[in-house]
Image (tube, rainbow, N blue to C red):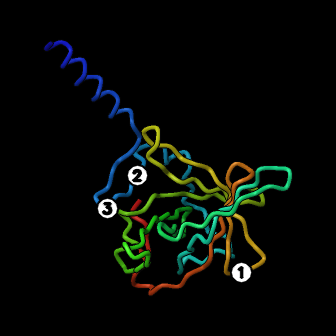
Amino acid sequence: MVKNIFIIIVGSFMLTSCCDLIGLQGGGVRSKRLYKRYVDFDCKPPSWIDTTVVYRKLYDSTYYGNGEYSIYSDTTHPTFMKFFDKGRYADYLIRANEKGKLKLSASSFALNKAFLGYYKIKTGSVEMYTYHPSDCGTFFKMNLLQTSDENKIMTAFDGNHFSFYERVEVPVEWLPQKPDW
């Protein structure tokens, strides 16, 4: 019995020490080590990205082939992105209230509520890496794309899933000016 409890405790310690995530009080998560593969502190955002605003996801679109696709919009859990200098951005999932209304405030954009992300400028494209707690912490890669509308941007994941974002201006004092990671 004691031996089994010891094995469970040691096994749990080994499993959690191998994980690459740190939970934050506000609900966000951070990478302990893996981020070093993705960060480029010399990276400046492309000229078509505004670091003084947030971008709100309008809808997702998935292409299935043969001309078939779906469009999905989640108004009760909208996603917002805030870009910073030096290759970093924050991804926020903000919940609407019980009446389905979205009330934004300075606390909506607290860094401890964000999923952290990094971006790199590659030959003619912008690669984004968003940290997620699945599988003890991992980064998901997307491409950031410019659209013909200067107030909108698009992300592409896996070649057939696209998300469209619209520029939203909120009071500048609500937005963090420097990321803490």
Sequence-first disc among 1 and 2:
2
Which x, y percent locates residue 96?
Answer: 42, 72
Element class at badge 1: loop
Q: Amino acid at mark 2?
A: Arg
**Residue shown at 42% from the left, 48% from the top:** 31
Element class at badge 3: loop
Asked if the residues shown at circle 1 and circle 2 are in contact, with their CB atoms under 8 angstroms apart, the answer is: no
Which residue is identified by label 1?
A: 150
Would you say 67 lies left or right of 145 here?
right
Which residue is identified by label 2?
A: 30
Q: Quadrant of the C terminus?
A: bottom left
Spatial CA span between label 2 and label 3:
12 Å
**Which residue appears farthest toward the front when viewing the image?**
99
Spatial CA span between label 3 and label 1:
32 Å
Asked if the residues shown at circle 2 and circle 3 are in contact, with their CB atoms under 8 angstroms apart, the answer is: no
> Is disc 1 surrounded by few (<14), some (14 to 19) or many (20+) residues within 10 Å?
few
134 in relation to 39, above or below: above
Q: Nearer the viewer, residue 92 or 181?
A: 92
Q: Amino acid at mark 1?
A: Glu
Kindly report which numbered mark, 2 or 3, lies closer to the viewer in this rendering: 3
Which x, y percent locates residue 125?
Answer: 74, 60
**Residue shown at 38% from the left, 57% from the top:** 28
Which residue is identified by label 3?
A: 26
Element class at badge 2: strand
Q: Nearer the viewer, residue 159 or 139?
A: 159
Sequence-first disc among 3 and 1:
3
> Is disc 2 surrounded by few (<14), some (14 to 19) or many (20+) residues within 10 Å?
many
Q: Quadrant of residue 3?
A: top left
Q: Nearer the viewer, residue 86 or 48?
A: 48
Spatial CA span between label 1 and label 2:
31 Å
**Residue shown at 55% from the left, 81% from the top:** 168
Q: Amino acid at mark 3?
A: Gly
